[in-house]
């Protein structure tokens, strides 16, 4: 297992991408690869297996989607025949939100190619997904459970998959997807390229890599469980009964400064999530809640309202801690500190993305202070 540590100063125009892909990349405003992109993309384009870890919000999705598109582009076809569009690359993600986010990026990057892209996840009707799959798809992004549904219905065939990507593999293991992963991987040709991206290189992830990757290049561009350097971390010591007022104060202070008060507020429970959203609404702040009890359609509608600016505050549980990308979002507020540090890191990673600056504000009681001892780098403490 080899390890990659050096960065490169190449621009995207010098990375060797085909003109249709490069055109889409430049259209997104990208000029220079981030560290994870600069280190991972050459190895992926060379067909190497890759095991990568990077801070959230540093461009990990493009680090694997762009070179995948480059690798399968020679096989792209403008034929209407589904047989000319088999699934050649499969991206597995643990959550619907992350699958949707990866797909959104993939659609943008592939827009000037003949590569067909689709996303399938649970919580919505299968019929539209079935129609897409039957028409032929080269790049498929999926959650494990829904993919297995389509395999059972014989609307998804993995026999021609050449590239497999496990995105947020640590989260998939945490959510108990290992049996599903094993079943899916057993249906994919053994001669393939496999990419594994994870927040941590835990013993479980290393074991997974040993089972399914062949002599992978290991890339780790930042210390584990660290928020991106673009995120300023702030702590406010606040009694439990005053947390809602603290959230309102933070949001209204931004209005007084002539700034947007759009923010994501994370809670630890579904009930607390709904209660806070209702309380903010009563305070005159447009808010919506997403959590595990909401249907996928409800989540998508609320997320769309937040993304288009018609909603000020998205109150969420950790279902939104990964995969959610809202351009220009400057603030994340932790109503409660999660029990596990990786969740804090991923929540904070919803801001400070793509090189922009962001602030992660944690509302901490004296009782919960022990949870933040391992948060690095040193934090500014607010009153």
Image (cartoon, helix red, strand yellow):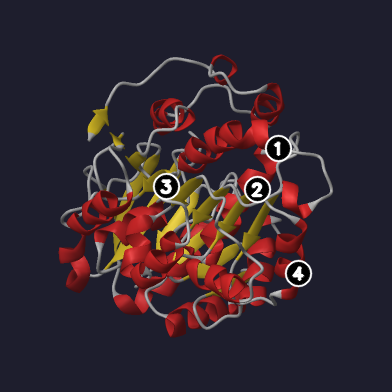
Asked whether residue 286 is in view, the answer is no
Q: Quadrant of the C terminus?
A: bottom left
Q: Which mark is residue 185?
A: none
Residue annotated with mark 4? 128
Label 2 or label 3, whichever lies nearer to me, is 2
> What residue do we see at 74% from left, 74% from top?
127
Characterize the local packing of mark 4: few (<14), some (14-19) or many (20 or more) Cα atoms within 10 angstroms.
few
367, 201: nearer the viewer? 201
Residue annotated with mark 3? 359
Asked whether residue 123 is in view, the answer is yes
Residue annotated with mark 1? 76
**Mark 2 or mark 1, which is nearer the start of the sequence?**
1
Looking at the image, residue 250 sits to the left or right of residue 310; the answer is left
Characterize the local packing of mark 1: few (<14), some (14-19) or many (20 or more) Cα atoms within 10 angstroms.
some
Label 3 or label 1, whichever lies nearer to me, is 1
Label 1 or label 4, whichever lies nearer to me, is 1
Q: Quadrant of the N terminus?
A: top left
Q: What is the CA distance from the residue labelled 4 to the residue labelled 3?
A: 39 Å
């Amino acid at each position: 297992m080899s390890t990659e540590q050096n960065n490169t100063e190449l621009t995207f125009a010098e990375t060797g991408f085909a003109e249709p892909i490069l055109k889409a990349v430049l259209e997104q405003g990208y000029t220079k690869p981030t560290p994870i992109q600069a280190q991972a993309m050459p190895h992926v384009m060379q067909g190497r297996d890759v095991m990568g870890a990077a801070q959230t919000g540093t461009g990990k999705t493009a680090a694997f989607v762009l070179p995948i598109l480059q690798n399968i582009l020679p096989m792209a076809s403008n034929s209407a025949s589904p047989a000319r569009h088999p699934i050649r690359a499969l991206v597995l993600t643990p959550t619907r939100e992350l699958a949707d986010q990866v797909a959104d990026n993939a659609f943008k990057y592939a827009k000037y190619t003949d590569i067909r892209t689709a996303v399938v996840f649970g919580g919505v009707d299968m019929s539209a997904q079935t129609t897409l799959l039957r028409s032929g798809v080269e790049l498929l992004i999926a959650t494990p459970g829904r993919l297995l549904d389509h395999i059972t219905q014989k609307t998804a065939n993995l026999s021609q998959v050449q590239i497999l990507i496990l995105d947020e593999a640590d989260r998939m293991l945490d959510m108990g997807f290992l049996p599903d992963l094993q079943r899916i991987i057993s249906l994919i040709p053994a001669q393939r390229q496999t990419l594994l991206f994870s927040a941590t290189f835990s013993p479980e992830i290393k074991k997974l890599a040993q089972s399914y990757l062949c002599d992978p290049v290991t890339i780790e561009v930042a210390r584990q469980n660290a928020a991106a350097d673009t995120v300023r971390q702030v702590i406010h010591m606040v009694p439990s009964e005053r947390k809602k007022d603290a959230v309102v104060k933070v949001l209204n202070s931004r209005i007084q400064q002539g700034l947007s008060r759009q923010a994501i507020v994370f809670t630890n429970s579904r009930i607390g999530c709904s209660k806070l959203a209702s309380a903010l609404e009563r305070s005159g702040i447009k808010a919506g809640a997403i959590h595990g009890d909401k249907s996928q359609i409800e989540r998508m509608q609320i997320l769309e309202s937040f993304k288009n600016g018609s909603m000020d505050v998205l109150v969420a549980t950790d279902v939104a801690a990964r995969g959610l990308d809202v351009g220009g979002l400057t603030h994340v507020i932790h109503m409660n500190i999660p029990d596990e540090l990786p969740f804090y890191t991923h929540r904070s990673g919803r801001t400070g993305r793509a090189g922009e600056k962001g602030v992660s504000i944690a509302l901490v009681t004296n009782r919960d202070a022990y949870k933040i001892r391992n948060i690095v780098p040193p934090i500014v403490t607010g009153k």
